[in-house]
Image (cartoon, helix red, strand yellow):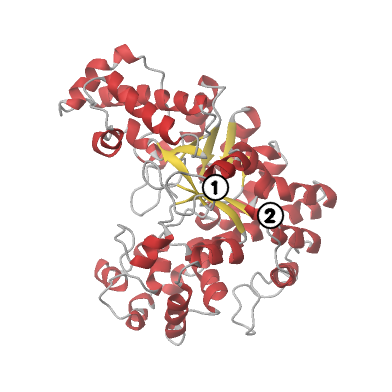
Amino acid sequence: MSGERRISRRHTLRAVGAVGTMAWMDSRTHGTELVPAQPPTAVRVHPAIAERVWQTPLIDTHEHLPEERDRLSGAPHPAIKADDWSLLLSHYLNSDLLVAGMSQADYDRFFAPTVDPLDKWQYLAPYWPAVKNTGYGRAVQIALQQLYDVVELSSATVAQVQAGYEATRRPGFYREILCERARIESCQVDAGPFRKSAMPTLLMADINFVGMIAGPNFEGYGKPSGIEVRTLSDWHRVIDWWYDQYGQYAVATKSAHAYARDINYERVPAEAVEAIFSKRLAGDRLTPAEQRSLEDHLFWYAVDKATELQLPIKLHTGYYASHNLMPLDRLRRNPGSAAELCGRAPQSRFVFMHIGYPYYEEMIALAKQYTNAYIDMCWSWIINPVASKDFLKKFLVCAPSNKILPFGGDYIPVEPVVGHAWMARQGIALALSELVEERWMSLADALDLVDPIMHGNARRLFRLEEKTRLLQHVPWS
């Protein structure tokens, strides 16, 4: 596969030297490195583990990246406001800024396309010390250093950051950032019902099925199919159309419906919701019970169709993006509901995303119990890098190691992915080193786990060799 490219000796030595002494970045200025040199009480990353982790390509199992051509052309995107260095802070870290107290007015000015990029630091400066060491902030800091050679973001370095942003943003910068800098073999992108990418073997696509069940979305899903929807069976045909049309090219199917409700879907027969569907089609308001029954039925119809095509089912669990809205009591029930899904459809392979943070111990128990449960660490390293390291460490001594997917950047801008990938490698190396240091496994066993968890599990679960062969000859590229 394309990801079997050689990792340069320069990259390997640079990473091994940094991680092997617990200096996580290859700092050049004493006292300003992101993480200082080895403190006396810290556990060292074993050099052999560091070398293996940094040499090994990653499979990135979750992104929201727009097409490179759209970034370069300035095509409208709801999450991209300004084409300047502030874009690196516009996804996830923007929420930390508001939670830290940035006013909406300063927020709007910082991300505005009409404000000079060199004038934006004044709006960020009061809040940067509070957010730069969160996972979201650290991913951006690492990206600034790796892409633009800027160790510390400040009024003195903003011009260098902006110049680096402009120099980097050119044709081919997705492959440079993802493949060369982050050493990622391929990404799996969730963008609309299905993305026909111009780089289909790099930006592999999921079929997003949330619009098939939530609402449902007659315009976004029904109209492209060309099927006139008058009955529930017509909507079944729409769902079939999406999977029949794109299932062979998709690597998985994905839903973030957990932002609206728990994932406790019951199997509801078609005859029980036909009248409800007709009400929805007519524009009549449904009761909460009616809406839930319709969603439950459509969920299982889509899941069963995906299962026929051997597509894993990715489901959001746990933490919410954005800020000031997160029903933790409902999120707490995600692991138990996930277990019920696995029991109701043992032939379906479920991928539960984001480790269900903060309820990740339960997700380890889920993966240990159910053959068809997989846990994806996408997004988790920047939500809480220490918890994610602990999660992986605990997972590897509790659940089968072929049930874990360790990385997905989950970003809209491509630039911070390099920072997130660095954090994931750091966490993987730390987790394995601590397990060896604490005598829970041998060094040889730890080294043997690197390839499977960093790319082998994903290659097998998502059938990436087969998909790559098909995607090399897609009709739209």
Q: CA distance from mark 1 to mark 2?
A: 16 Å
Q: Nearer the viewer, residue 475 or 422?
A: 475
Q: Nearer the viewer, residue 474 or 68?
A: 474
User: Of the residues under marks 1 and 2, which one precedes in the sequence?
Assistant: 2
Residue 399 location, quadrant: top right
Residue 218: x and y in percent read: 25, 33
Q: Secondary structure at mark 1?
A: loop
Task: Estimate how packed mark 1 is, as few (under 14), some (14 to 19) or many (20 or more) residues with alpha carbons within 10 Å.
Answer: few
Which mark, residue 446?
Answer: none
Give above or below for 162 relative to 65: below
Give above or below for 121 relative to 198: below
Q: Secondary structure at mark 2?
A: helix
Amino acid type, callout 1:
Gln
Which residue, given by chain and number where applicable, does mark 2 sit on? 4
Task: Estimate how packed mark 2 is, as few (under 14), some (14 to 19) or many (20 or more) residues with alpha carbons within 10 Å.
Answer: few
Give above or below for 158 relative to 460: below
Residue 302: x and y in percent read: 41, 27
Amino acid type, callout 2:
Glu
Q: Nearer the viewer, residue 456 or 400?
A: 456
Which mark, residue 472?
Answer: 1
